Image: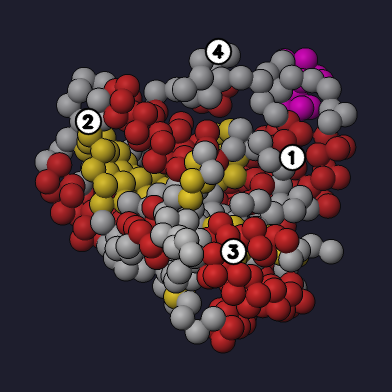
Amino acid sequence: MSVYLDHAATTPLRAESRAAYIDALDIVGNPASIHGVGQRAKQLLEESRETIARSLGCDSIEVILTSGGTEAINFALKGLFWSRNAEGARPIILAPGGEHHATIDTLEWLVAHDRADVRWLPLDEEGTLHADVLDAALVEAAGRCAVATVIYGNNEVGTVQPIDELSRVAARHGVPLHVDAVAAYGHVDIDVARLRAISGASGAAGLVALSVSAHKIGGPVGVGALYLSRGATVEPLLHGGGQQRNVRSGTQDVAGAIAFATAAELAASERADEAQRLTELRDVLIAGVRHAVPEVRVNGPRTHRLANNAHFSFPGCEGDSLLFLLDMAGVAVSTGSACQAGIPEPSHVLQAMGRDEREARGALRVSLGRTTTRADIDAFLAALPEAHRQAKKAGLSDREVTRR
């Protein structure tokens, strides 16, 4: 029986969400139709939107339903950039190093196609973007910044950013801030209204957009949402029927919204207790890894990190080697690297934190979820020593081989 410890990639669909989705598939009617059947579908859709909004601490009209976190991130960054830089006066986008590829690739596309001037901001050794770094970058931008973006909880190393401080800086400079909260959703108390209030955000400045995804909290794949402030102005990605405040046209997925809302309500009610439980399991895991492999390095902060995240660097090993060996032992984890054409790539997050390439290549992420038990942790710790022995023997893929 396999042990699943890759919940940061996706977590199992909740039984309640699955049941709600299956029942909702029998709902007939387009929520944009004005007849009774359509209006019933619309009622269920809007009730689901209200539930999702409560989980984010915002008004339901500020929830734009999407096909997932990637679309929500693309929508926010492209939409805000196109709107703010329509006359070419604000080409600058500010982003920390170590962001998710949904952000990195979107910004690189804007550079290639819309002449965006992306300025990557440095992280400290724990992966934190400090408010004074953002402030200095905005001063240097001198009113030419279209949008700033930051990941709430890093999907690799788990660092939780000081969103209130970053939003305060953005608001003071009159710049909109987008937050990628896909990894943080369900693990961090997200209350947009409170964050905007304490940071002085108003209108289109400060925290104005926040992206989430259903499958990270036990909802279905293919459903997500973007919090978009009433005061924010964006250029739509999709055009058509004018649904969702005329910024995301298209027939809305009623069944997906209902299943998402079911998961969101459950995740919100369980969050505090689950965060404590996962923190305790994570700490047992980290202590066990340190005991099994004394030279291991734990990445990310001791506090101010996602409760379900543990991230390690194993000197002299390829993260991919460890992943495959653990997988053969029946334990599913993740590396902190991306493989392109079978060539191991170093973790861009660790490199943004100042680590060298060799250390960044030995990364392994272990992420927990609501189905994780102490037995799962024990199984991982039992499999690790032999997997590490073999991975270290294999070494890094670019090592020189001596023929005898």
Mark 3 or mark 1, earlier in chain: 1
Mark 4 or mark 1, earlier in chain: 4
Q: Is residue 297 visible from the viewing direction of this image?
A: yes
Quadrant of residue 329 within the rendered picture: bottom right
Q: Label 1: few (<14), some or many (≥20) within 10 Å?
A: many
Secondary structure, mark 2, is: loop
Q: Is residue 333 magenta?
A: no
| Residue 89 x, y percent position in the rendering | 17, 26
Residue labelled with disc 2: 91
What type is the residue that disc 2 sits on? Pro
Q: Is residue 163 visible from the viewing direction of this image?
A: no
Nearest-to-viewer mark from 4 and 3:
3
Q: Distance of mark 2 from mark 1, alpha carbons?
A: 39 Å
Mark 2 or mark 1, earlier in chain: 2
Q: Distance of mark 3 from mark 2, alpha carbons?
A: 42 Å
Residue at the extreme front: 404
Residue 258: which numbered mark, if any?
Answer: 1
| Residue 49 x, y percent position in the rendering | 64, 39
Q: Which quadrant: the N terminus?
A: bottom right
State yes or no: discs 3 and 1 in contact (Cβ < 8 Å): no
Q: Distance of mark 3 from mark 1, alpha carbons?
A: 39 Å
Q: Distance of mark 2 from mark 4, alpha carbons?
A: 28 Å
Q: Toward the viewer: 394 or 111? A: 394
Total numbered labels = 4
Mark 2 or mark 4, earlier in chain: 2
